[in-house]
Image (spheres, coloured by chain):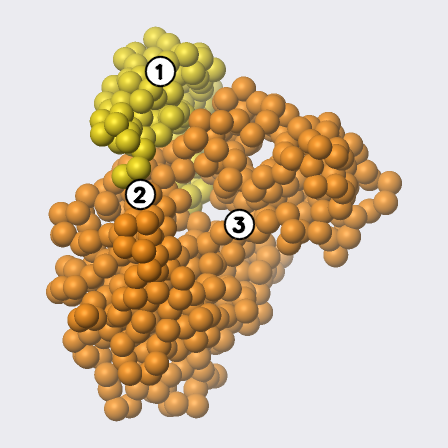
Chain colours: A yellow, B orange
């Protein structure tokens, strides 16, 4: 039997979870205040995952970078590999929220998607910086 | 020029939610003034996830959360002037407020409004407010400045980083900079507990084995042109450095995450009275300041941990502004009861309640002054206890809330006050 004390990270309440894995491999979670907490506690001792957020270079955009996230949580051990993939990526404006910038990042099955709109730089459309 | 019904100062999460709810409550002429080149405020640089769980029931990043409100404001055709800096707010007592602002299109703008919602947010405590000795080398940034550089401008502030203060932005930047290839050597926190949310300690430090040094502070900053290192010292119970505990850590960047200060220079000009504890306006149950028709919400009122709570609070401010404009909720007997925080409770928002003007229930948010366990919070009207609340653990970094019931205040007289206090170890050794 193994007991682990965790802090739930699903929301800022940060519930104190007690996760017990018995000898038969059955996992019980207590201390949670919602189903998400129970799911997290179970997952954290069997297959811990995280959503990764970062930025991707944008060419000709209103901003030089666009914020991105993985479309679903990925195994904790794959964070480095996903970050390497994100850092070697660059895209051209315009970028819209929800655009898939990289499918199946580092073989995780999760897509890297934009979380912000980055329009094309106005000066390149209108030929003037002075608007 | 005809006065606006409502001018909202600031187009961040608070300003947007306030304007949206005012419009939905029937306010016609609304204008949002925003100094940045896009609405959304600080959410635009908060690219991490964890926003919106309470508001939308799903986990969003900051920019995604902002877009939902921006789209709503657009759909409701609420005008927002961007790149516009508000310089002055005045109230001559006539009921119409003067707003002086400027931008590159309009030049100097002199606007008037019957009602104002303050939603200017907060800013970070800078190095100058922290008494850190040493030269003034390059490489000292507030955590939020570094966040903007990395997440919006695509630049790294340095390679080897020490963070002073364990506020949420500092913790989030520890992870962010690590993911971008920097080495975050330590997070030093003056207090014996972290000022950040538990989830950020787990996700941003523990996941990446970044040490959190509690009861530590920076006692020297090395380097003349560029930071070359810092000296960290342990501090005693009175936050005084303990001689002999110094350790030097080489780094090229020091980030400061040492607290947020509501940005109330404009409120001050308007004659709004500010709380010395929160740094924000003192407000009543309607989130209205001492200046009639001037409301406040979001981080300008008091610093929040959760944007969801900002949106909720701001929506109430918008609704109350709409009610003010309709001149409802005025009552002959509208005396005001102060809410007095005592014994471990640091502050409450609102600070006063007019029982006759409140809805059936009123959400009161508060923070405690230290970490307490096994504690009970007592709410009393004069000598009569009207509510208790049990908390297994309570920390200054996590805002608390309770709901006051109008029925419980029915017996109140104008000389009463509402007292909120905390008792620790209520179960003793049991």
Residue that numbered label 3 is attached to: B124
**Chain containing mark 3:** B
Question: Which quadrant of the figure has residue A92?
Answer: top left
Badge number at residue A90? 1
Residue at (69, 37) in percent of width and height: B137
Marks 3 and 2, how far apart at CA? 21 Å
Mark 1: give few (<14), some (14-19) or many (20+) Cα within 10 Å. some
Residue that numbered label 2 is attached to: B38
Same chain? Circles 2 and 1: no
Quadrant containing the C terminus of chain B is: bottom right
Quadrant containing the N terminus of chain B is: bottom left
Q: Residue furthest right?
A: B244
Which tag, 3 or 2, sits closer to the chain's start? 2
- Asked if residue B35 lies left or right of residue A127, the reply is right
Badge number at residue B173? none
Residue B9, horizontal then vertical, whole percent = 33, 59
Q: Is residue B325 above or below residue B370?
A: below
Asked whether disc 2 touches disc 1, contact meaning CB atoms under 8 Å apart, the reply is no
**Chain containing mark 1:** A
């Amino acid at each position: 039997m193994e007991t682990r004390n965790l802090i739930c990270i699903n929301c800022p309440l940060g519930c104190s979870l007690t996760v017990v894995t018995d000898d038969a491999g059955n996992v019980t979670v207590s201390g949670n205040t919602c189903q998400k907490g129970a799911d997290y506690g179970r997952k954290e001792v069997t297959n811990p995952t995280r959503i990764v957020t970062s930025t991707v270079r944008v060419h000709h955009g209103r901003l030089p970078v666009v914020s991105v996230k993985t479309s679903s949580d990925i195994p904790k051990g794959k964070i480095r590999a996903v970050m390497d993939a994100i850092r070697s990526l660059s895209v051209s404006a315009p970028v819209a929220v929800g655009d898939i910038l990289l499918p199946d990042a580092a073989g995780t099955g999760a897509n890297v998607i934009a979380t912000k709109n980055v329009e094309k730089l106005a000066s390149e459309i209108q030929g003037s910086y002075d608007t | 020029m005809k006065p606006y019904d409502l001018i909202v100062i600031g187009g961040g999460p608070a300003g947007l939610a306030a304007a949206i709810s005012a419009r939905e409550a029937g306010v016609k002429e609304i204008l949002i003034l925003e100094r940045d080149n896009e609405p959304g405020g600080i959410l635009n640089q908060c690219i991490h996830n964890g926003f919106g769980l309470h508001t939308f029931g799903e986990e969003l990043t900051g920019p995604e959360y902002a877009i939902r409100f921006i789209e709503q404001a657009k759909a409701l055709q609420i005008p927002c002037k961007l790149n516009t800096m508000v310089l002055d707010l005045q109230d001559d007592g006539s009921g119409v407020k003067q707003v002086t602002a400027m931008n590159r299109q309009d030049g100097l703008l002199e606007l008037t409004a019957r009602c104002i919602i303050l939603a200017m947010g907060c800013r970070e405590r800078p190095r100058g407010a922290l008494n850190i000795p040493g030269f003034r080398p390059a490489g000292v940034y507030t955590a939020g400045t570094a966040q903007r550089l990395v997440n919006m401008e695509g630049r790294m502030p340095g390679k080897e980083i020490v963070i002073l203060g364990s506020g949420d932005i500092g913790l989030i930047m520890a992870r962010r900079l690590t993911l971008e290839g920097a080495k975050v050597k330590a997070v030093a926190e003056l207090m014996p507990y972290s000022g950040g949310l538990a989830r950020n300690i787990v996700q941003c430090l523990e996941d990446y084995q970044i040490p959190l040094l509690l009861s530590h502070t920076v006692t020297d900053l090395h380097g003349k042109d560029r930071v070359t290192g810092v000296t960290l010292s342990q501090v005693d119970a009175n936050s005084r450095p303990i001689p002999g505990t110094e350790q030097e850590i080489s780094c090229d960047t020091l980030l400061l995450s040492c607290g947020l200060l509501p940005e109330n220079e404009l409120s001050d000009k308007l004659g709004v009275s500010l709380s010395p504890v929160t740094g924000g306006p003192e407000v009543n149950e309607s989130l209205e300041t001492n200046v009639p028709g001037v409301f406040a919400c979001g981080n300008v009122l008091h610093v929040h941990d959760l944007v969801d709570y900002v949106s909720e609070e701001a929506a109430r401010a918008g609704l109350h502004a709409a009610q003010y404009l309709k001149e409802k909720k005025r009552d002959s007997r509208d005396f005001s009861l102060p809410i007095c925080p005592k014994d471990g409770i640091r502050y409450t928002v609102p600070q006063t309640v007019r029982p006759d003007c409140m809805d059936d229930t009123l959400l009161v948010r508060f923070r405690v002054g230290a970490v307490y366990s096994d504690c009970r919070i007592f709410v009393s009207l004069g000598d009569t206890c009207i509510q208790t609340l049990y908390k297994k653990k309570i920390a200054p970094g996590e805002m608390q809330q309770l709901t006051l019931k109008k029925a419980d205040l029915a017996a109140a007289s104008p000389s009463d006050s509402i007292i909120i206090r905390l008792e620790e170890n209520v179960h003793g050794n049991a």
